[in-house]
Image: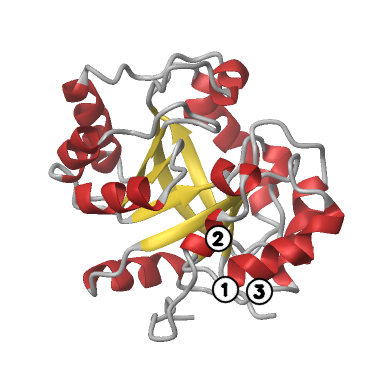
Amino acid sequence: MAKKNNLYQDILSAISLGEKLLAVLIDPDKMASENVSGFMLKLNASKATHIFVGGSTVEVHQTGLLIQKIKQLTTLPVLIFPGDVSQLSSHADGLLFLSLISGRNPDYLIGKQVEAVSVLRTMQLEIIPIGYLLIENGKETAVERVTKTQPLRRENIQEIIDTAKASELLGMKCVYLEAGSGAMEPINAEIIRSVKNELQIPLIVGGGIKSNKQLDSAYASGADIVVIGTAFEEDERFFDELKKAKSDALLPK
């Protein structure tokens, strides 16, 4: 299947038309091989526009093997959401090139990115630079444990705004507000709205979204792309709430 070469431009075009995009995050550590086909049937029938694949701790080659299976079962764009350089795979369409700008660990600000370059030279992936902000959600996340960084505090909205804006000024193409996998609460509407009002680039929001009401709230507050992962892992019936209407337009291929 041919790779999609204009992922970012397609995102911008969809946003300009008022479309709200939905990405499903699949963690290779939590997706058993025998469950992939059934999961993808439900995903393809949903309003999902993108598939993100990755996790904080994934065995070497596991990400690539999962992406190969997914690509055989969908026409949706598949992007790597990497926790480490070992998760890079030429089988994906694109890469979210994350910099954890909410933390101060140089390995995750720039170190891992430098390490990835020699691998990326051998791959034809569309690379989308992302300013990644971890926001506290009431419990420790895998991202905190792996990166040894602290999330930004929810009540310090100005720091969140300024960090997101700095990301844009540094040249990032998107800002990603992340509450973390299994978050107790999603990022609240005030934070999303305040950050969106400062940005000229797309805003991605993920973590803790487990209902249509929370999904709609994120969109209404300004999220351009919402990412859902744990909700599907814990209860695939959530797909039933997100079934695609016959009139729904698909993101341009």
Residue 89 lies left or right of residue 17; in this view the side is right
Does the image show residue 173? no
Q: Nearer the viewer, residue 101 or 65?
A: 65
On the image, numbered disc 3 is attached to which residue? 74
Of callouts 1 and 3, the N-terminal one: 1
Residue 157, placed above or below residue 116: above
Q: Which mark is residue 239?
A: 2
Q: Which mark is residue 45?
A: 1
Circle 3: element type: loop
Q: What amino acid does circle 1 point to?
A: Ala
**Residue sitting at 23 percent across and 38 percent down?**
189
- Are the two marked residues, 2 and 1, in contact with CB atoms closer than 8 angstroms? yes
Rounded to the nearest angstrom, the CA distance separating label 1 from label 3 is: 10 Å
Residue 86 lies left or right of residue 243; in this view the side is right
Residue 94 position, x and y percent, is: 56, 60
Residue 141 position, x and y percent, is: 55, 22
Does the image show residue 243? yes
Residue 168, placed above or below residue 111: below
Q: Would you identify the image quadrant in which residue 74 lies? A: bottom right
Image quarter in which the N terminus is found? bottom right
Of callouts 3 and 2, the N-terminal one: 3
Q: What amino acid does circle 3 point to?
A: Thr
Rounded to the nearest angstrom, the CA distance separating label 3 from label 2 is: 16 Å
Q: Would you identify the image quadrant in which residue 171 lies? A: top left
Residue furthest out toward the left: 197
Instruction: Name the front one of labels 1 and 3.
Output: 1
